[in-house]
Image (cartoon, rainbow, N blue to C red):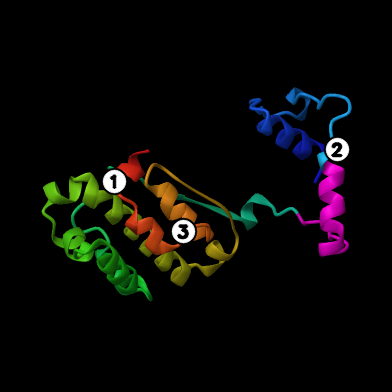
Amino acid sequence: MNVRVARAAWALVRGVRCRRSASSFLLPPLGAVDVEELLRDATAAEEGPREASVRRLPGQCSVLLFPGQGSQVVGMGRGLLRYPRVRELYAAAHRVLGYDLLELSLHGPQEALDRTVHCQPAVFVASLAAVEKLHHLQPAVIENCVAAAGFSVGEFAALVFAGAMEFCEGSAVSPEEFLQ
């Protein structure tokens, strides 16, 4: 952990807004515990010597950005059904949600798909189904992914993709939780 990260962590704990440059971080008051030293001591025994990470060139990494509510359309997901695991995703969503999300996504009606209770799980599952297609067609994009983000409900797809949330957790979130 470098000094900039330690200062940022210190500033966040105290509610100070972080800015882009290291010079804008407030310095800890004199006599404050040196967080960097504590963390280094705590992890030194566990990890052993650390290798320097190699910086990747922009052309050698990827970032996935997942769509949010409003991107739903009847028929979405139809072209993804031939890829491995996509039907499993929709089957799991069916078990969690209690209704056939695939049927609704493929055949509508649009008015029902536009309802928040339906469109958010539909966009969530279709997003992860698209990742399955991408993994099948261009596995290097998935393997070299350095970040994932999403708009609105796309944040949940990004969290599932990153391994920070389970698929069933993301698909079981109620519309009220999606809107928070």
What secondary structure prevails in the magenta region?
Answer: helix
User: What is the magenta range?
Assistant: 36-54
Q: How far separated are the C-alphas under marks 3 and 1?
A: 17 Å
Amino acid type of the residue tagged 2 in the rendering: Asp
Q: How far separated are the C-alphas under marks 2 and 1?
A: 43 Å
Do the residues under discs 2 and 1 have CB atoms within 8 angstroms? no
Q: Residues within 10 Å of mark 1 (few under 14, many from 20)?
A: some
Eye-nearest disc, 3 or 2: 2
Residue tagged 1: 175
How far from the left and from the top, in percent, is residue 6?
78, 38
The reply, left or right, for residue 39 in relation to residue 109 is right
> At x 30% / y 73%, what residue is drawn?
87
Residue tagged 3: 160
Label 1 element class:
helix
Of the two numbered discs 3 and 2 on the same chain, state the one appearing first in sequence: 2
Label 3 element class:
helix
Q: How far separated are the C-alphas under marks 3 and 2?
A: 35 Å
Q: Residues within 10 Å of mark 3 (few under 14, many from 20)?
A: many
Residue tagged 2: 34
The reply, left or right, for residue 84 in relation to residue 120 is right
State whether residue 112 appears in this view: yes
How far from the left and from the top, in percent, is residue 82?
31, 74
